[in-house]
Image (tube, rainbow, N blue to C red):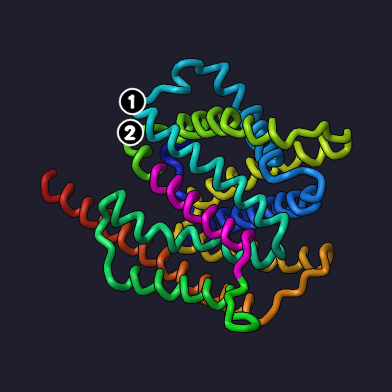
Amino acid sequence: MSHDDKPAAPAADRNLEGALWMVASAVAFTAMTTLIKYLGDDYPASLQTFYRQLAGFIILLPIILKRRRAAFATTRPGILIFRSAAGTLGMILSFYAFQKMPLADANALSFTRTLWLVPLAALVVRETVGPLRIGAAVIGFIGVLIMLRPGVGGEFAIGWPAAAMLASSFLFALTITGMKVMTRDHSPTVLLVWAATLGLLMGIPGAFFTWRWPEPFDLVLLGAMGVLGTITQGCYIKGMSIGDAGAMAPIDYIRLVFTVIVGVALFHEIPNIWTVVGSGVVVVSTLFITWREHQISKTKAAAATASSDLTA
């Protein structure tokens, strides 16, 4: 029996393998955010972003050298430039939030990128967005308001770090929407190469204005932070590609558990009841949106298969 003739692995086995990749992604993400917070007193978010982008570029450099012009083949550089600009700014804002906020709070707010995808899908990709997804997004943003609860004197407990994370989530949602548009005629490798190259170039100005020469040990930690960011993305993509998307998405929320543990153990950050309740509402709403997207994708795939069978 040839390799191509081997039966596909059972769905349960694929989901188990995918789940392990997703857990690995969550572990790498937690380690990365821990380093972001630990180094934050001495290295501003813009400088950390530069090192993160530099590590990603170095990892992709062999592919760039091997494929050369083919690695940058595109007919729509404008969208790629805009996507990289949004991603770089979003990274700086998220790093700033992780430095200044409790890890659990910042991580919970980062999941709002799924909520932003609902209006962006309707406005940018021209997808039909039904009342269920709209309702889930509204409920999710109510969860955000719970986390940013009214404080003493009726003022919202929102500061620059929380605002930065919300803005970062919106920018990352833009990059995801842009990826949906570009993957119609671009390979994932081309998108990664453009993102890494432009991200490094766009990270230089922020690094220039906040530059300081790192101590040797700090340089190792900054490099490790960058590598962990790339590992996080790689494990996430691998897990989602192997396992069923509807089964993999909930596993990503284990990051909340990991960041709570690290926050308590290393930084003495104990989440309050508002964070717990609000993040729970956000998680439930984003899980529903993910499940709904998965069901719609399955329906479209089944319809396409049926149409193909009829025309065969």
Residue 39 part of the magenta-drawn span:
no
Q: Residue at x 45, y 23 (%)?
A: 72
Q: Position of residue 99 (x, y in %)?
A: 72, 55
Q: Position of residue 73 (x, y in %)?
A: 40, 22
Q: Left or right: where does residue 286 sit relative to residue 235?
A: left
Q: Residue at x 57, y 64 (%)?
A: 109
Q: Position of residue 131 (x, y in %)?
A: 28, 72
- How many circles with numbers are drawn on the protein? 2
Q: Residue at x 21, y 51 (%)?
A: 304
Q: Is residue 278 visible from the viewing direction of this image?
A: yes
Q: Is residue 7 visible from the viewing direction of this image?
A: no
| Residue position for label 2 | 185
Q: CA distance from mark 1 to mark 2?
A: 9 Å
Q: Left or right: where does residue 264 sit relative to residue 217?
A: left
Residue type, numbered disc 1: Thr
Q: Left or right: where does residue 122 sit relative to residue 170?
A: left
Q: Nearer the viewer, residue 98 or 298?
A: 98
Q: Nearer the viewer, residue 25 or 219?
A: 219
Q: Main secondary structure of the magenta part?
A: helix
Q: Nearer the viewer, residue 3 or 166?
A: 166
Q: Secondary structure at mark 2?
A: loop
Segment colored magenta: 158-178
Instruction: Quarter of the image for the N terminus: give it.
Output: top left
Residue type, numbered disc 2: Asp
| Residue position for label 1 | 75
Vertical arrangement, residue 189 with respect to residue 93, above or below:
above
**Where is residue 261, by image quadrant?**
bottom right
